[in-house]
Image (cartoon, rainbow, N blue to C red):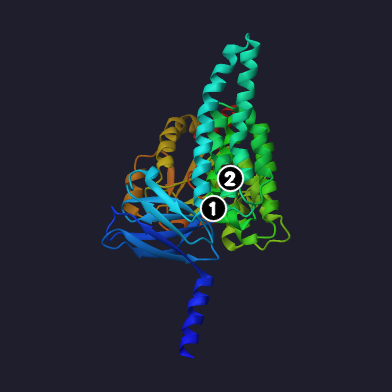
Amino acid sequence: MKKIFILFLLVTHGLFAQTIKGSFPQLQNSEILLLGFNGFANKELAKTTTDSIGNFELQYPAAFVGAALLDIKNITSVIILLNQENFKMQWDDVKDFNTLQFSNSPENDAFANGIAINQAAESKLNGLKYLLPQYEKLPNQHKWLQEEIANQEQQFTTYLNQLPKDSYAKQYLKIRKLITDFPQTANRYIERMPEHEKDFNALNFNDEKLYTSGLIQELLEGYFQLMESHLKPKKMYLHINASTDALVKSLATNTTFQQEVAQHLFNYFEKRSLFPAAEHLALQMLNQTNCQLSEKSTNLFEQYRKLAVGKTAPNIIFENKDNRVKNLNLKKLKSTYKLVVFGASWCPSCQAEGLELLKLYTTWKAKNVELIYISIDTDKTAFEEAYKNTPWQTYCDYKGWDTQAAKDYHISGTPSYFLLDANNTILVRPNNADHANAWISQKL
């Protein structure tokens, strides 16, 4: 009976784990971590230490299919693909990726071959496209160049089509290729933008294999940065919002990941000052009927429903014990316009913007425009040192993000601006000090 039980353990263990054996001769007694990608983060799949001659063995969950980071502590790391394979790795020189070899791993062989084929094709394409306009008056040569360009552009796709349908490398390489194409398209091949947009909008973001690829962040930010770089604002927002809609719809049945993606993308739009795109995404998420938003998501997105242009901004009240700073009741403040700014001493962008505000404040003050600066600092010494010479009133209760004004205005990043009229009606959410000044100058 004991033998049967041991045999059962061995069999069931094999069902739930795969094995990676490796030999890295240069790395004796070194810690190795296997980190599987998990949306925007990663999780530990396995950990071990190489022996005195650099050999090791790792067992990873058979259920995990995706990309992983093989991290050699304090030395180097490499991306590998996992798809229910038991395989071996031989890496004679960890400073040279060309010496890394796999045995019994079609996935990692396909991955390496795909990268090599794409790099070779792109190198040839650069030369061919440079020569093409120089041979316009030579029909035969020009035709050959066009045909060869078309041939090279198909090399990678042809290779992917030859891979098995269940190959993870096939999907991974396709997404990775799209990501690496974005900056090249922006710099040299802008005619490819419609094709990229079509491919992006057709992606199934609900695919678990995309979730475990480690490519989500690069994919989102690379794509929207491409849209931003070559489209005029009005047209840009139409395209960005259409892609946002496709993304949200694709994740409609996976509300947990949908919120994770939406939060990341929202913060990215805010960071890039793409406020109309952030607003569109926020309202899309808030208006869904099939999704119960978490408190974090709700707080993040509500600023565009409660603080939209035309709404009345929440009142801000500060009772200061410091005699150098007046008490504040925003509602009772008598000014033609009020620019509410949220910042912090530790924020580099706030420091740069502070210099711009200093240049503009005297002019604004003469036009009856008041600047109200709310700091989310927690360190009194740092706060006082940073704002001791500012000509405008700066308010801080040292509660950080929990200061009531920051919560009422749903602040998630600094600096954040709100331009109000005398009645606290929100007129515009400026991207920066210059944007606020352009609006004020136009009105006054």
Residue 186 is left or right of residue 400, and the answer is: right
Residue 415 is left or right of residue 76, and the answer is: right
Q: Residue at x 57, y 31 (%)?
A: 185
Q: Residue at x 50, y 49 (%)?
A: 109
Circle 1: residue type: Ser
Across and down, in percent, residue 81 comes to: 50, 54
Q: Quadrant of residue 135?
A: top right
**In this orientation, which residue lies closer to the viewer: 434 or 340?**
434
Determine which of the numbered discs, if any, sits on residue 324 in the image.
Answer: none
Whether pointer 1 and pointer 2 mark residues with C-beta atoms closer than 8 Å, the reply is yes
- Dot 1 or dot 2, earlier in sequence: 2
Circle 2: residue type: Ile
Mark 2, residues whose alpha carbon is within 10 Å: few (<14), some, or many (≥20)? Answer: many
* Residue bearing the label numbered 2: 175
Determine which of the numbered discs, if any, sits on residue 213 in the image.
Answer: 1
Across and down, in percent, residue 438 comes to: 56, 29
**In this orientation, which residue lies closer to the viewer: 250 or 351?**
250
Is any atom of residue 432 visible in this view? no
Across and down, in percent, residue 413 comes to: 50, 48
- Dot 2: what SS? helix
- Seen from this angle, which residue lies furthest top? 137
